[in-house]
Amino acid sequence: MLRLRQTLCRPVLSQAAVRSIFCNRPVLDGCRFQRPPLPQSFAHDTILRDKKILIANRGEIAIRIARAAESLGAKSVAVCAPEDVDSPHVAFADESVVLPQGKTAIAPYLDVKALTDIALERGIDFVHPGYGFLSESADFAQSLENSGVAWVGPPPDVLRLFGDKIQARALASQSGVPVVRGSSNLTSSDECMGLLKNGDVNLPAIVKAAYGGGGRGMRIVRELSQVPSSFDSCQREALTAFGRDEVFLEEFWENTKHLEVQIIADGQGNVVHLYERDCTVQHRHQKVIELAPARNIHPQLRERLLDCAVTLAMNCNYKGAGTVEFLVRGDLDSTDADFVFMEVNPRVQVEHTVTEEATGIDIVQTQLLIAGGRSLEDLGLTQDSIHLRQHSLQARITMMPGKGEILDLYEEPAGDGVRCDTAGWYTNFKPNQMYDPLVGKLICSSPGLTFADFEKARKLMLRSLKGFKINGIANNIDAVERILTHQEFIDNKVNTSFLADNPELLNPSKARKPSNQIDHGSAKRKYSE
């Protein structure tokens, strides 16, 4: 039975008020704002009790980490930019610190020195970086290590390795993981042109930032005439976004599935996988809907992907949670499907939630406990003990350009099989649009691994979207509904070009009366690109 949680309050609230409004749930296990725990929660573990965890992030992931910290008996410390003091994540922590003013609204969250100084001044034991910002920064991890503060994530040398896409690809190749043909660092568009003309790399190809990520710093090249402009624009974006302008060239695999394997390692030589996720539905390299596990995947293909991911992590002494990403060409249910390594994301992913729901394992708790010295064996996480239990879908709910700045009404869906990891919004709140537009993540799950079970989860998400009210601010809820009701999505026939090939799903003005759309009612809001 779907229930609505409505929040009605003033825009500026105390810490206690924000928690009580946003978390209108029963108190569980002594936690102030813990949702019902996952089946394999580690809340009984006391190793982090009364330790202090600095959350070097904001928004929904900061709230998620604070929730995990409290469930383990630890104290959380939030940070915020001066422009971000009203962000709800600040009120969810036990303590908060305003960062020094930066040149931009984002700059304070990237200030390694200021964050390290705060960690020392506040007696911080651990720093969890979340995702984005400094989550993959070897310099930040090294600064903390040098200061005697524990980093929740892989060690600095591993972050440097996977921060360089060329080195990462070399490690994959040495580990027997299939890789796509590509180049080393390129210094000019002429060098890029030479590789293509000589057939060292075939068209279509993609110019990529060597230190990039998050879907940025990439340009697809389909004709030789596009090389100069694509190379130059990619190099400029890489310098602006990542502070380094090194780029390289790879063959571009089109019409593929994008699968990723969740791994967890304890830094003591032990690695396990939590199976795979399907992140194929994406817009301009930004994921929109994620699934766990992948549907109709052949057991042999799954085994090959999982083995490659675990081997790669073993060969670099990985520690913490991470994701190994692959492109798969061909039908997932075929033994003939090919795949190639893309990259490793050495951090918690936005979509970690679907794996948590699919396996029942709390990934963020696990990150914290491993940083605290627990081994996988200590946590009972042997590969034989990890199983898939249900289908889970996640939709990213985001703000879009358009009407309004203040929430006239904000309600989140709730109920059996429904989970919302959100940024703590409430009615009359004014979101800060200088930051990530992510409102939150809607996760819907249904026990079992059959097509019928997936359909139950999909239909639950459709019902839940109807109950997700974000009135007053443009958002993408209607676009998500259109994707979920598209026959190709239902039949698992989508590839990474799905949204580009069906632009009406994102923008109704581009509709061409598709014959494969199931009618679940006309959309009332428009999705703005």
Image (cartoon, rainbow, N blue to C red):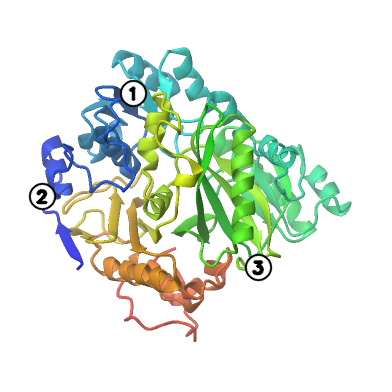
User: Which quarter of the image is occupied by the C terminus?
Assistant: bottom left
The residue pinned by badge 1 equals: 100
* Quarter containing the N terminus: bottom left
Q: Rounded to the nearest whole Å, what is the CA distance between mark 2 and mark 1?
A: 30 Å
Left or right, residue 207 beside residue 420: right
Q: Residues within 10 Å of mark 3 (few under 14, many from 20)?
A: some
Q: Position of residue 241 (x, y in %)?
A: 54, 39
Side of 313 relative to 57 (left or right): right
Residue 334: mark in rendering: 3
If you read the primary sequence from the N terminus, does the residue marked by circle 3 or circle 1 appear first?
1
Q: Is residue 198 visible?
A: yes
Judge left or right: residue 463 versus residue 270: left
Q: Residue at x 25, y 54 (%)?
A: 405
Task: Say the numbered circle drawn on residue 9.
Answer: 2
The foreground one among 481 and 523 is 481
Marks 3 and 2, the one that precedes in the sequence = 2
State the SS at label 1: loop
Residue 327, given in percent of the width and then of the height, sits at 63, 56
* Image coords of residue 503 (percent x, y): 50, 71
Which comes before the other along the chain, label 2 or label 1? 2
Indicate which label's residue lies in the foreground, 3 or 1: 3
Instruction: Give yes or no for contact between labels 3 and 2 (Cβ–Cβ under 8 Å).
Output: no
Q: Which sits in the foreground, 144 or 39? A: 39
Q: Is residue 181 left or right of residue 35?
A: right
